[in-house]
Each structure stands twice: as C-alpha cells, then as structure tokens.
Amino acid sequence: MFACGAQKAEVTWQEGDVPVSVRFADPYFALGNGLAETRHVFLAGNDLPERFRPGFQIAELGFGTGLNALAAAQAWNESGQSGHLNYTSFEAFPIGAREMERALSVWPELAPLAEPLVRAWGAGARFIELLGLRLTVVEGDAREMLTHWTGRADAWFLDGFSPSRNPELWEEALLADVAAHTPPGGTFATYSAASAVRNRLSAAGFEVERVPGFGRKRHMTRGRQP
C-alpha cells in the first residue's frame, strides 16, 4: 500500500540508555524519564485514556523507539477496553531492533509489550499485533506517505525531532494534512511549544492551546479539531 523510502537511523547514547539521533542531534525522548514524558505529553495531552472507545485510532509522526505506542497500548489495556487500539505511525528513519531493545529495556513494566515488538521489528514486520494493540508503521517521508493514508485519527502524537533540527515534520503543508486526517472532536498533542508550530496548526483548523510541559520544558501544545 505504501512505498518505502526509509533510511535506517544512526544512534548514539546519552546517560546510559537514552538514544540520540545522529542525523538530528536530538534525543528520542526526555533525558530522565521518557515514559513519564510520553504519559504527560501524548496521553494526557490527548485526554487519554478517558477518550478511549472501541475502534479508537491514534496516528503519529515519528515512531522512534516505539515507546509512545507501547505506553498507549499499556493505557488501553489498563482502561479495560476490549478489542485492539489502532495505531499508525509514520517514520522516515527507522531505528534498528537492537537499539530499540536497549532503549525500551529501561522500563521493565513495558516488557510484555516491548519484547514481542522487538522480535517482530527485527524480523522486518511493520504491521504488528500485540496485546491490545494493532500497530502499523509506515516507513518513508510523512509528507508523501500521509497523503496516501485512507484513515483518520482520533488522536495525533506529533513527535518529530525538534522543529529547529527536523523542520520537515513541522511544515505547514504536512500539518494541514494532519488536520485533514482528523475528524471533528479529534485532537493532537506535541512537546513543542514553538510559535511557528502553534500558528501552523491553528491555520490548519485546529483550536490550539499552550499548556504546561514536561520536565525541563515549560510548555507544550495541544489542540482539537472543532
């Protein structure tokens, strides 16, 4: 369905097991506690798990280590939902399975989900079913891939690297495409509070607000499709 135009990510490490993109010179998640960051920014930022319902669809720009997907699946399972959470992520520079395993090993509580994810990822699978999660990772440039996606997301995790280092994932046209793939009442959240990002999301049609961020970040951005 999707053409693959991805290049494998190159990774170095900080503070033990925090992966850092060589290409973008930016960590994949917060130094200190990436799982807590995910829960604050992407789950709480999209009012999850409160909004979960059967057939719920999350979409994401920037799959990274898979941490966000696993945190969402854990929240889905703990909320008592039946069936699967649908999760589609767009990633131009997929991480290797060994790097994924090392990064996720920091959180033993995710092991029941992380271990089968790493095995499937290492075998080349990009459609992966885990406990409570139906995951699809679309490899390639999101500016091209999202246009061909036929789905719509109830919640977006906008998790590209910093806009100053990875401007491609924050371009006006791409964020407009995100809005076009969001039904009324759908939401987004991102760690970024850059004014340019907020303005582009607002121009795309979202109701946008700046709210307290996680850790060292004073603010983040969230919004809703009216």
Image: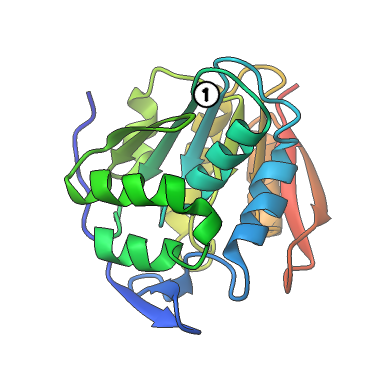
Residue located at (49% from left, 61% from top): 161
Which residue in the structure is indicated by mark 1? 181
Q: Is 93 above or below relative to 105?
A: above
Residue nearer the viewer, 53 or 219? 53
Q: Is residue 147 visible?
A: yes
Residue nearer the viewer, 34 or 225? 34
Left or right: 162 with respect to 100? right
Image quadrant where one finds the C terminus = top right
Residue at disc 1, secondary structure:
loop
Residue nearer the viewer, 12 or 15? 15
Provide residue 19's location: percent of width, then percent of height.
42, 72
Residue 89: name its quadrant.
top left
Left or right: 151 with respect to 91? right
Left or right: 59 with respect to 137? right
Residue located at (70% from left, 33% from top): 49
Residue 189: name its quadrant.
top right
Left or right: 46 with respect to 114? right
Image quadrant where one finds the N terminus = top left
Residue located at (17% from left, 46% from top): 123
Provide residue 54's location: percent of width, then percent of height.
59, 15
Q: How is the image coloured?
A: rainbow
Residue 166: name its quadrant.
bottom left
Q: Is residue 96 visible?
A: no
Provide residue 39's location: percent of width, then percent of height.
67, 51
Q: In the rendered structure, which amino acid carries the disc numbered 1?
A: His
Label 1 packing within 10 angstroms: few (<14), some (14-19), many (20+): many
Residue located at (62% from left, 17% from top): 183
